[in-house]
Amino acid sequence: MKYFDLTHLFDPNMPLYPGEPRPEINQVGFIDKDGYNDFEIKTGLHVGTHMDAPSHMLKGGKNLSDFPPEYFFGPGHLIKVKGDKIGAELLENKNILKGDIIILMTRLYKKFNSTEYYENFPEITPAFAEKAVKLGVKIIGLDTPSPDREPFTVHKILLKNDILIIENLTNLEPLAGQKKFEIIALPAKFPTEAAPVRVIARII
């Protein structure tokens, strides 16, 4: 059995979505002085590999802590993306069932440390989002910073149907050609609209 980590290392110097505050990791306890090491983190919740909950875009929407743990596990489906639009045709002739997890590979993650990453990412079309809703998908993960741009129509379509969104995945190449794999995506249990998430693919 093989496992692949699809998560970027949390680094204060990592690139940020425009407008996000710069995260900080500060050491506040030192083993030579205090007898232990201790760190504090100051960060926005939409940096690095993270998960969006409905309350990110919807008034009265659920926080991540409102979802049961089984919501964060499920059969994965890798869909390769070419071009600047992610259309509904990519979901045709796929054996995607209710409760499954879609992973979209654009390969843009290879440019994570460049300004191009946030400027030229492909967008999910509303038609793709609506098709995902009909299929009963529960999570969509991307190796890009967002499924769409303002006015964030796709975000709202997905989130109002309790489809969680994972942004900034990495290392998706090992999943290409795999017949079956499971996604394990456990966010920190914060009562918030988003949280850092460790995403693992388990090859079945």
Image (cartoon, rainbow, N blue to C red):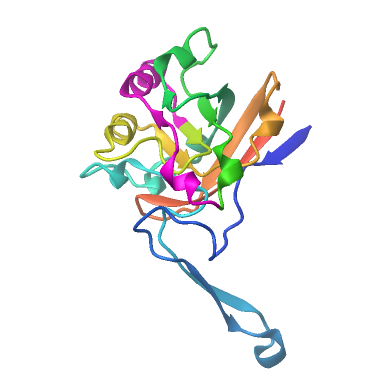
In magenta, the rendered stretch is: 114-139
Is residue 53 visible to the viewer in this orientation of the structure?
A: yes
Residue 68 seen anywhere in this rendered image of the structure = no
Residue 26 versus residue 146 in the image, above or below: below
Identity of the residue drawn at 46% across and 19% down: 98
Q: Nearer the viewer, residue 8 or 68?
A: 8
Residue at horizontal 37%, vertical 43%? Answer: 53
Q: Residue 115's spot in the image, x, y percent?
A: 48, 51
Direction left: furthest residue: 59
Q: Residue 109, position in %: x, y?
A: 57, 42
Seen from this angle, which residue lies furthest top? 93
Rendered location of residue 103, percent (x, y): 54, 29
Q: Is residue 127 above or below residue 143?
A: above
Magenta includes 124? yes
Figure quadrant of residue 170: top right
Q: 201 or 143, which lies in front?
A: 143
Residue at the image point whose x is 67% and y is 92% from the top = 33
